[in-house]
Image: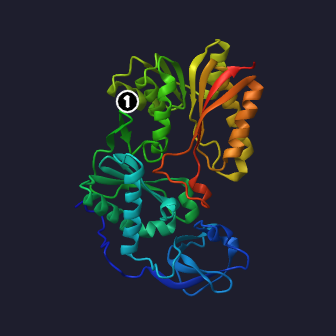
Amino acid sequence: MLILNTEFDTSREEDLCGSARAVLKKKEGRTLKAGGLWVYDNEIDKIEGDFENGEILSVEDFDGYFLGYGFVNLRSRIRIRVLARKKADRVTAAFLKKRVRDAWEYRKKVIDTSSCRVIFGEADFLPGLTVDKYEDVLVVESLALGSERIKGIVLQSLVEVLAEDGIRVRGIYERSDAKVREKEGLERFKGFLTAPFETRVPIRENGISYIVDVENGQKTGFFLDQKDNRRAIHKICRGADVLDCFTHTGSFGLNAAIAGASHVLSVDASDLAIEQARENAALNGLDQVVEYQVADVFALLPALAAEKKLYDVVILDPPAFTKSRNSIKAAARGYREINLRGMKLVRDGGFLVTCSCSHFMDPDLFARTIQEAARDARKRLRQVEFRTQAPDHPILWASDESYYLKFYIFQVTDEK
């Protein structure tokens, strides 16, 4: 059995809930009562009893009605993140292991689990924790003080649950280096939680081999949420000349190439990403099909238009243009600009693949932004597909933050 740097007994029934209780104001807690897991600072009337930040307490409505158990942090605007809703479900190590087993059993039913997200925070009722599985390596991200306290139990549970299916975890790496941790009073951290291992991990997805850099890659090293969407472009890329923008480590471009594209130009602003993408192309024998360029996409697209370049398929998979509600208007302008430029490069009758990975850019706003871009580009769009994130990133209704990825395929025609 793989040993974490600290061992945990996942069978223990010791109660992890403290004696303190939070009482909500009258008519507050709408998100929680609708099925969400967050209680905000302005919704709480009082907290009674002794507690430390990160501890688990009970949550009650103004009239004493029990609403759940969750961990509290007075430093955070998200004051409480709920772990359990039933009064009988006192949080123990055994309870957390059941949460982990439920998450794994769900994924076995809905997706290829060779590499997938095995824990998706609130959507798996384990707030603040994300765990990605790359073959026999786990990568964890902990974003809340409370999740930091249960992280070891959850990871040990996951190692044990996977072992029941004959999967031996080789090592665990932590990528809790996001700036948002500072809002929880936590330092950013990255490093091994087990004995050190080779952090360049080979995986295979949709028939394509990749080397995932779990130590230095973006997020946890690879964007597993687009797995099914990458496969969805295969049918439109046969024999096509493809422009792949924001390629990161090359996944969309490589899917276009393996589907039979005649030529792919993959572009990213990061030298490291392009270096890794080239390595992945060579690994699959596709380096003669895919051409790579380090460039700012916003500057490159107008330059390609000035050269009167046209492509059969244009793929736009940009990073999130907004990570807060305060910058939504600026983000909408960015999405409008990039889609307008992209549409102008699509040959009449060709295809536009376009995405947004920000949950603040809600589906209606993203659709309106694309529509405005099409109008200004004097193009007509025929929707082929609308998709969201892969099912290993489940969308929990009433938990808006779990729904973030919007993915469209359009056929683009000149105005007729």
Q: Is residue 136 above or below residue 371?
A: below
Residue located at (31% from left, 67% from top): 6
Question: Of residues 237 and 183, which is closer to you in this image?
Answer: 237
Label 1 residue SS: helix
Left or right: 175 as drawn, with respect to 300: left
Position of residue 334 measured from the top left corner of the image (x, y, whole percent): 69, 36
Instruction: Provide residue 343's location: percent of width, then percent of height.
Output: 66, 24
Please name the amino acid that badge 1 sits on: Asn
What is the quadrant of residue 194 in the picture?
bottom left
Which residue, given by chain and number where applicable, does mark 1 sit on? 280
The crowd level at tag 1 (other Cα within 10 Å; few <14, some 14-19, many 20+) is many
User: Looking at the picture, does residue 324 appear above or below residue 59?
Assistant: above
Image quadrant of residue 337? top right
Q: Position of residue 102 (x, y in %)?
A: 40, 63
Residue drawn 51% across the image and 18% down it? 240
Residue 56 appears at what percent x and percent y? 50, 77
Name the image colouring: rainbow
- The reply, left or right, for residue 315 in relation to residue 193 is right
Q: Residue at x 55, y 60 (%)?
A: 182
Eyeballing the image, is 130 above or below 19?
A: above
Determine the image quadrant of residue 48. Answer: bottom right
**Depth check, front residue: 263 or 79:** 263
Q: Is residue 169 left or right of residue 22?
A: left
Q: Which residue is at the front of the view, 192 or 43?
A: 43
Q: Is residue 174 visible?
A: no
Quadrant containing the N terminus is bottom left
The C terminus sits in image quarter = top right
